[in-house]
């Protein structure tokens, strides 16, 4: 089957071309850049909300984009079992739109952080993690100033298996020293109840070619391989 993926562009998106390159050229999945006001979810099998600074994030990261017509289309896509992932600013948009639980706050250090981090897979049943091993460690970079995850419903997320990734050290251990931004419980990514919508601060599109990775790993490809697998099984 032919899979069609949309990358939704907002004013200020700047990681859209990175994602486009990985999906089109590395994964050979037909992928199109679509301006948010023109996005129609019925034309696609899945969607990516890329990183950047949507609308300049003047009020709060992702809050203006969360009211775009594209979000209504995204809601319908999820009802139609079509997967959606929000990366960095895309994650912020999904939480502000309440498609994902919690909020992203300013980093504990009050500084922009750009570096490679380790993620531990906490849930490998989602549309974007089904090709990963539970408990495996991924090498993925971050680049954000407001990535500190917070929720007042932590137990609910734990009970519903909605925590998808946690920041850990090289040995897979969790602690303050392995938490780059002060996120609650070292949370790096979460999903919705149906596990079709995933959001995370790290950038898998920047970890999908060995030439870009300091460890020559391509763990980012697993996200998009999982998406492809989910769509093919759905159809």
Image (tube, rainbow, N blue to C red):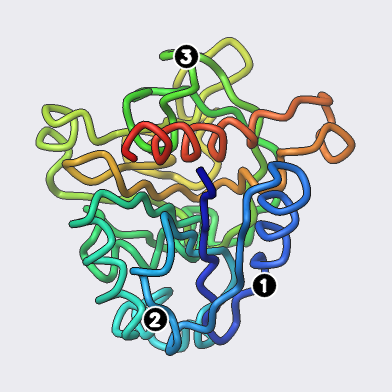
> Dot 1: few (<14), some (14–19), or many (≥20) neighbours within 10 Å?
some
> Dot 2: few (<14), some (14–19), or many (≥20) neighbours within 10 Å?
many
Q: Examine the image and state in which quarter residue 110 appears.
A: bottom right
> Dot 3: few (<14), some (14–19), or many (≥20) neighbours within 10 Å?
some
Q: Which residue is mark 1?
A: 14
Element at label 3: loop
Residue placed at 29% from the left, 73% from the top? 73
Q: Which residue is mark 2?
A: 65
Element at label 2: helix
Q: Examine the image and state in which quarter residue 127 appears.
A: top left
Label 3 or label 2, whichever comes before in sequence order: 2
Alpha carbon separation for disc pair 3 and 2: 33 Å
Instruction: Please give left or right for residue 14 compared with residue 167 in the image.
Output: right
Instruction: Please give left or right for residue 26 compared with residue 3 in the image.
Output: right
The foreground one among 55 and 6 is 6
The foreground one among 33 and 28 is 28
Residue placed at 71% from the left, 54% from the top? 24
Q: Position of residue 115 (x, y in %)?
A: 71, 44
Question: As drawn, which residue projects farthest toward the front?
Answer: 1
The foreground one among 158 and 35 is 35
Alpha carbon separation for disc pair 3 and 1: 30 Å
The label shown at residue 133 is 3
Residue placed at 34% from the left, 79% from the top? 63
């Amino acid at each position: 089957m032919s899979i069609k993926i949309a990358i939704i562009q907002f004013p200020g998106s700047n990681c859209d071309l990175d994602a486009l390159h990985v999906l089109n050229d590395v994964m050979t999945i037909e992928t199109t850049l679509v301006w948010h006001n023109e996005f129609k979810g019925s034309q696609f099998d899945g969607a990516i909300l890329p990183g950047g600074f949507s609308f300049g994030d003047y009020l709060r990261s992702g809050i203006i984009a969360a009211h775009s017509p594209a979000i209504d289309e995204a809601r319908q896509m999820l009802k139609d079992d079509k997967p959606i992932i929000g990366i960095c600013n895309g994650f912020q948009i999904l939480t502000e739109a309440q498609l994902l639980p919690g909020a992203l706050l300013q980093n504990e250090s009050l500084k922009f952080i750009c570096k490679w981090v380790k993620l531990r897979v906490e849930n490998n049943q989602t549309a974007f993690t089904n090709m990963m091993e539970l408990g495996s460690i991924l090498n993925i970079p971050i680049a954000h100033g407001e990535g500190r995850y917070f929720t007042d419903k932590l137990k609910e997320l734990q009970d519903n298996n909605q925590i998808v990734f946690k920041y850990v050290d090289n040995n897979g251990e969790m602690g303050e020293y392995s938490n780059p931004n002060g996120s609650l419980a070292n949370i790096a990514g979460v999903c919705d109840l149906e596990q079709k919508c995933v959001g995370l601060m790290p950038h898998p599109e920047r970890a999908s070619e060995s030439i870009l990775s300091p460890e020559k790993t391509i763990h980012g490809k697993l996200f998009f391989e999982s998406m492809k697998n989910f769509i093919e099984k759905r159809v």
